[in-house]
């Protein structure tokens, strides 16, 4: 029976090589007064930001740049960017980068219209008003923040990554131009690519999954299995970068509309406690959490294996499901992801607190199998 569903997608998405050229005219048509560009110093120094501002200049679009976003954006980052937004009388936001600038820009957009502190909005659909109109230019094939109703901000005082699921933060224009993703370092490509794989797999096995999200997630898994190794090996491979851009874009739409699971909940604690890059944390934890989940939906894991290129024709459902975990681990190894969380600085004495915080994380509700405190701690231990 077909279900009743509410689907959240950006009103306009531009995807493919060279689509960045179409953005300036879209912004000009909005008749905005001044744009706040939210990005980081590396992208500014590398000239990626200038590629965008040159386009804005041709259309005589006024802007001011905030490039202080950290890899795991903090409350302080958000407050500083919001101050620049207000001081310059901005009425539009343009984010350039991976998940960190995207999430920071979303937070600024919510605070600009709703007020208060960003801590006030942790949880699901807390805000009352739509965020400031935002165009999000993605430069990594991973987080999909440019198409989702999710954003994550680190509370530096509590050392906790706060997850906001908020329909009001959805951007107006999402841009995925693989030409902006060329020549990214191999470790960044690997981490963001495994982040996209985590999104697709968690969406597929989530308790909120439904046929539309299933098809999206499986196709994303297939694209990632085909192209991530090539994208990591050769940063100039436009075909591989294009496939990864599409994969993360598709996976983002899937999980934004059906939820994630405990991989993200557990990874958020590594980010909050040790400032671990989000994609790396997800990649290391993914096979361990999914081994725990395997018994909940073995038939789905069998299909994941097939999507990852495993010949499952002679396997039982259980054998095929197990082979999915092997394929995930092999891909992670092939692209250079660390083998355990010990390499990321994790300490056993922190596991209980991290496990408690992970169980309280909003993503845990989507996990296909109920997790106890002991289960959560065991997952961290197994991932060492």
Image (cartoon, rainbow, N blue to C red):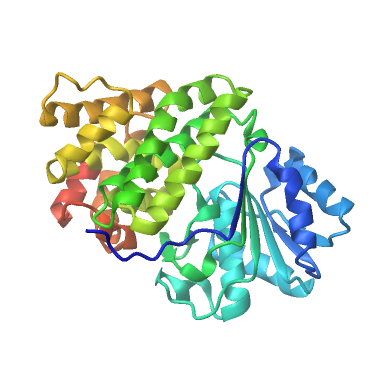
Q: Could you tell me if residue 345 is visible in this image?
A: no
Quarter of the figure with residue 242:
top right
Pinpoint residue 310: horizontal percent, then vertical percent. 27, 22
Please give the name of the residue rendered at 57% of the width and 46% of the height, measured from the top-left corner: 98
Q: Is residue 223 above or below residue 334?
A: below
Q: Is residue 244 above or below residue 40?
A: above
Relative horizontal placement of residue 142, taking residue 265 as reference (left or right): right
Please give the name of the residue rendered at 24% of the width and 30% of the height, measured from the top-left corner: 325
Relative horizontal placement of residue 187, taking residue 260 as reference (left or right): right
Pinpoint residue 124: horizontal percent, then vertical percent. 38, 70
Q: Is residue 132 above or below residue 134?
A: below
Pinpoint residue 88: horizontal percent, then vertical percent. 79, 71
Front residue of 374/59: it is 59
Please give the name of the residue rendered at 26% of the width and 45% of the height, measured from the top-left corner: 348
Relative horizontal placement of residue 327, taking residue 86 as reference (left or right): left
Relative horizontal placement of residue 358, taking residue 184 as reference (left or right): left
Q: Is residue 251 above or below residue 230?
A: below
């Amino acid at each position: 029976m077909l279900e009743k569903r509410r689907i959240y997608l950006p009103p306009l998405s531009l995807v493919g090589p060279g689509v960045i050229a179409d953005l300036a005219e879209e912004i000009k048509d909005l008749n905005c007064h001044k744009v706040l560009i939210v990005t980081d110093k590396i992208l500014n120094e590398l000239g990626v930001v200038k590629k965008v501002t040159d386009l804005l200049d041709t259309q005589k679009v006024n802007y001011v740049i905030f490039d202080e976003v950290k890899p795991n954006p903090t409350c302080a980052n958000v407050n500083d960017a919001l101050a620049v937004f207000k001081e310059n009388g901005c009425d539009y936001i343009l984010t350039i980068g991976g998940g960190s600038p995207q999430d920071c820009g979303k937070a600024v957009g919510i605070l600009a219209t709703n007020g208060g502190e960003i801590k006030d909005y942790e949880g699901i659909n807390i805000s009352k008003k739509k965020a400031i109109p935002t165009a999000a230019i993605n430069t990594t094939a991973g987080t999909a923040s440019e198409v989702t109703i999710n954003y994550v901000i680190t509370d530096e005082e509590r050392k906790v990554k706060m997850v906001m699921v908020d329909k009001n933060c959805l951007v107006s224009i999402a841009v995925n131009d693989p030409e902006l993703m060329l020549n990214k370092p191999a470790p960044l490509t690997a981490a963001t690519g495994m982040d996209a794989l985590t999104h697709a797999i968690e969406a597929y096995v989530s308790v909120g999954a439904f046929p539309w999200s299933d098809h999206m997630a499986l196709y994303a898994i297939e694209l990632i299995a085909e192209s991530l190794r090539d994208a990591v090996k050769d940063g100039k491979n436009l075909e591989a970068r294009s496939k990864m851009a599409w994969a993360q874009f598709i996976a983002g739409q899937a999980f934004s509309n059906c939820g994630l699971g405990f991989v993200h909940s557990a990874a958020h604690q590594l980010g909050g406690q040790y400032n671990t890059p989000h994609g790396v944390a997800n990649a290391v934890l993914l096979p361990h959490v999914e081994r725990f989940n395997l018994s909940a939906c073995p038939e789905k894991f069998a299909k994941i294996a097939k999507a990852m290129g495993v010949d499952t024709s002679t396997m039982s459902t259980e054998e095929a499901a197990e082979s999915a975990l092997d394929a995930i681990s092999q891909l992670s190894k092939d692209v250079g992801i660390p083998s355990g969380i010990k390499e990321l600085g994790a300490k056993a004495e922190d596991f209980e607190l991290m496990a408690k915080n992970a169980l309280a994380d909003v993503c845990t509700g989507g996990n296909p199998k109920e997790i106890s405190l002991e289960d959560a701690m065991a997952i961290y231990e197994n991932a060492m």
